[in-house]
Amino acid sequence: MNLVKANKESITKASQIIKTGGLVAFPTETVYGLGADALNPLAVAKIFEVKKRPSFNPLIIHIAEKDWLNEFTIYNDERINLIIDKFWPGPLTLVLEKKNSVPNIVTSGNPTVAVRMPNHPVALELIKQSETPIAAPSANKFGHLSPTTAKHVHKYLGEKVDLILDGGKSDVGVESTIVHYDNGNFYLLRFGGVTKEELEEV
Ligand code: AMP
Ligand code: MG
């Protein structure tokens, strides 16, 4: 059985799976994610395979600390830091110019990468222990409903995932808001857990 309660032991086991190129489903505050080492192209390829996700649909990478952002993206605008300070950890994804450290399979060949810091203790601990950003779309087959429980993940993806960490029900239940920063301008790409009004305030 690949479904286990998230605790110190199982999170450490999950981080070993991530480090060795496997797939781990884990809870975030939005929905359950299907995660792999974002810096390992073969591991990321498994996400696309299991989800039957088209390869032109880029992934969000999840980080555990705000300053990891500088390792993977390039930007020079104080407003980005204001947004991060206000909304991270939380359901806000930033699309920024990527560094070469991010494999092309993650971004579907785009020169930009989507990054977020989830507000969930299990997700944060898993990413920290894995010592790498985790690429993770929702843990469902392409075109199906996003899962908010571990059981739901198990029902639809079953044994195709190496380990499913059960951390209870995701409480936002809606996807992250996505903001694309390009050349001094901000573009709202997807409505989600953070509202347009909250963003405009910052
Ligand atoms: P999800 O399907 O919830 O994992 O969210 C991934 C979504 O983030 C994609 O479908 C895109 O809409 C968006 N996204 C991810 N990376 C990028 C990127 N580099 N540029 C623009 N949008 C992106
Ligand atoms: Mg999804």
Image (cartoon, grey):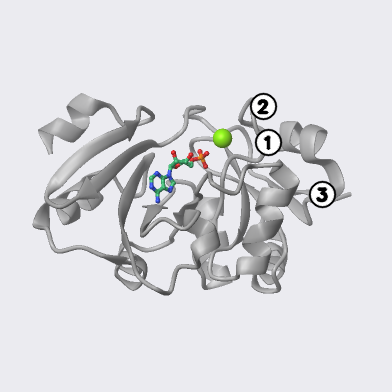
> Where is the C terminus found, in terms of image quarters?
top left
Secondary structure of residue under mark 1: loop
Q: Position of residue 197 (x, y in %)?
A: 18, 25
**Which quarter holds ligand 1?**
top left
Given residues 4 and 141, the one toward you in this image is 141
Do tag 1 and tag 2 residues touch (Cβ < 8 Å)? yes
- Circle 1 residue: 140
68 to 25, vertically: above or below: below
Q: How many marks?
A: 3
Question: Please, what is the three-letter code of the amino acid marked with disc 1?
Answer: Asn
Label 1 CB, ligand 2: below 8 Å?
yes
Residue at screen point 52% across, 73% down: 131
Q: Work out whether mark 1 precedes mark 3 in sequence or the reverse, and give the earlier one.
A: 1
Q: Which mark is residue 144?
A: 2
Mark 1 is surrounded, within 10 Å at the Cα level, by few (under 14), some (14 to 19) or many (20 or more) other residues, namely: many
- The answer to whether residue 8 is visible is no
- 18 vs 148: above or below: below
Image x and y of residue 77, in percent = 12, 58
Q: What amino acid is found at the position of numbered circle 2 in the picture?
A: His
| Residue type beneath disc 3 | Lys
What element does badge 3 sit on?
helix
Q: Position of residue 5 (x, y in %)?
A: 73, 48
Q: Quadrant of residue 41?
A: bottom right
Label 3 environment density (alpha carbons within 10 Å; few <14, some 14–19, many ≥20) = some
User: Dot 3 corresponds to which residue?
Assistant: 160
Residue 75, image x and y in percent? 20, 63
Task: Look at the image and tell me whether residue 60 can be seen.
Answer: yes
Q: Does residue 194 sit above or below 179 in this rendering?
A: above
Name the residue: 70% across, 35% down: 141
